[in-house]
């Protein structure tokens, strides 16, 4: 590269591409600290070591250096897993010099235009698979699994319609929770199932802000106070809206307080947990368009996360150790895979396993119990403790991967040259 400053048109193109890359990384669910670090690295690679970038959950700001023009762009809606993988590939090829800025801009346009690879009915089946899989792990009774499957269809239909109507999108958490809670509490009153509270959260798990809460807590721990606080507060508001739907359904049906007990129904055998893991993996593949080439890696992370979470729960049932140990593995293994294999994005390998950590479902149970008077301050503190333990586990897992991942990345760059 020449020592002279690039032409203004090239500088504008670089600023545009880096800004768009920041927005797409944020839309993928990356913490803002990681987004800013990645964009600064890409800027240095392009000849702008003084890139200034500030990311938030809703917008990104960027200039190539102090005193130069700055741009702002909104963070558009969340990306599917196939789009997340494509954004990761563009970032990697830019970082290694295999894409020019102009080519990267074209690729980013194509990523946003990618249609979902499956028709709507397949996506509905995928969400049902996720809901049934979570139920087989959390509440494996046969009537409970049936209600979870039926509830997932209701959630899928509401989710589809919410994309077409703004008002419905705003009311989606409360409406979905109300409809699913009517099914679960109705079955409870008819004597068809026990533990309706744990049952109703299985179809709602696809909507709950668990990842949002944990990402916010991890951002707070890393010093991103504005982004972290906004995510946590927004997540708590969403939990409150879900709780309103659950409490509203309980009032309509006049259920007793026993319906809000955290009761787990025993399943037919040990085989239900592996079946649940398989259904979650296949369901996410169909509903979120997980590339089939990454299926085996996501399944590996999913199984290891479940094993670590189960081991933690067995060793300390009274403490949120299970979520902590599961989060350490869920963060460590994808980070390691992402460094040794450039075709395995860390975020894409990690997200499916996050369903097992279910901090959002725990939060909904706690808030709902408080809403009907069966919970207290200890319930809320327990919920906060679980979310914080999962966030801490994610940070520790990422830190543990650094000593191995950095030498691996250096070796890979050298062999590619």
Image (tube, rainbow, N blue to C red):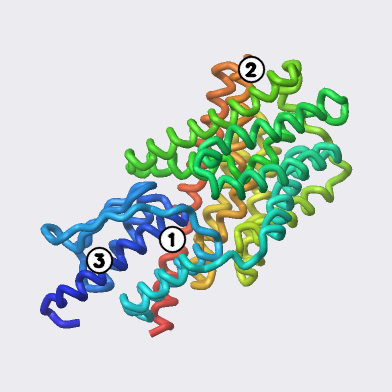
Observer able to see residue 207: yes
Q: Can residue 277 be seen here?
A: no
Q: In this picture, is 229 found above or below 5?
A: above
Look at the numbered discs 1 and 3 and tell me whether their residues touch, using CB distance below 8 Å.
no
Q: Secondary structure at mark 1?
A: helix
Say if 187 sits above or below 313 in the image.
above
Point out the tag, 1 or 3, that comes first from the N-terminus. Answer: 3
Q: In the image, which disc is placed on residue 15?
A: 3
Q: Is residue 320 left or right of residue 202?
A: left
Q: Position of residue 292 (x, y in %)?
A: 64, 69
> Left of 53 or right of it: where is 369?
right
Q: Look at the image and tell me in which quarter the C terminus lies.
A: bottom left
Quarter of the image with the N terminus in it: bottom left
The disc at residue 372 is: 2
Pick the front one: 302 or 117: 117
- Local crowd size for mark 1, using a 10 Å CA cut-off: few (<14), some (14–19), many (≥20): few
Report whether 324 appears left or right of 267: left
The residue indicated by pointer 1 is 403
**How many other residues sit within 10 Å of disc 3, few (<14), some (14-19) or many (≥20)?**
many
Compare marks 2 and 3 and give the one earlier in the sequence: 3
Question: CA gap, disc 2 to disc 1?
Answer: 48 Å
Question: Which residue occupies the extreme bottom position in the image?
Answer: 417
Q: Position of residue 379 (x, y in %)?
A: 59, 22
Name which residue lies at 38% across and 55% down.
34
Q: Position of residue 393 (x, y in %)?
A: 52, 44
C-alpha span from label 2 to label 3: 52 Å
């Amino acid at each position: 590269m020449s020592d002279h400053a690039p032409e203004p048109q090239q500088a504008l193109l670089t600023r545009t591409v880096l800004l768009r890359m920041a927005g797409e990384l944020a839309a993928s669910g990356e913490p803002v600290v990681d987004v800013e670090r990645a964009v600064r690295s890409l800027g240095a690679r392009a000849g702008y070591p003084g890139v200034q970038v500030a990311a938030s959950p809703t917008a990104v700001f960027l200039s190539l250096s102090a005193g130069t023009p700055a741009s702002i762009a909104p963070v558009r809606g969340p990306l599917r897993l196939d789009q997340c993988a494509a954004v990761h590939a563009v970032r990697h090829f830019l970082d290694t010099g295999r894409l020019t800025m102009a080519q990267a801009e074209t690729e980013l346009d194509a990523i946003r235009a990618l249609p979902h690879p499956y028709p709507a009915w397949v996506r509905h089946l995928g969400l049902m698979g996720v809901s049934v899989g979570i139920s087989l792990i959390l509440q494996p009774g046969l009537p409970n699994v049936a209600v979870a499957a039926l509830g997932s269809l209701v959630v899928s239909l509401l989710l589809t319609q919410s994309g077409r109507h703004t008002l419905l999108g705003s009311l989606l958490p409360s409406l979905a929770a109300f409809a699913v809670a009517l099914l679960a509490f109705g079955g409870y009153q008819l004597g068809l199932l026990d533990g309706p509270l744990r049952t109703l959260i299985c179809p709602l798990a696809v909507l709950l802000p668990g990842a949002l809460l944990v990402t916010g807590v991890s951002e707070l721990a890393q010093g991103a106070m504005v982004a972290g606080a906004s995510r946590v507060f927004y997540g708590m508001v969403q939990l409150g809206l879900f709780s309103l739907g659950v409490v509203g359904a309980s009032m309509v049906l006049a259920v007793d307080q026993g319906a809000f007990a955290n009761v787990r129904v025993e399943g037919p055998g040990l085989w239900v947990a592996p079946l649940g893991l398989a259904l979650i993996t296949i369901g996410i593949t169909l509903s979120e368009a997980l590339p089939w080439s990454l299926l085996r890696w996501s399944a590996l992370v999913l199984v290891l996360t479940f094993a670590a979470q189960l081991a933690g729960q067995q060793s300390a049932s009274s403490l949120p150790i299970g979520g902590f140990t599961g989060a350490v593995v869920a963060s460590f293994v994808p980070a390691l895979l992402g460094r040794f294999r450039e075709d395995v994005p860390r975020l894409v390998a990690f997200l499916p396993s996050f369903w097992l950590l279910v901090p959002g479902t725990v939060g909904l149970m706690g808030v709902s119990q408080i809403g009907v008077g069966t919970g207290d301050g200890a319930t809320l503190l327990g919920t906060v403790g679980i979310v914080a333990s999962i966030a801490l586990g994610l940070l520790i897992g990422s830190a543990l991967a650094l000593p191995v991942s950095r030498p691996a990345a250096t070796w890979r760059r050298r062999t590619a040259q």
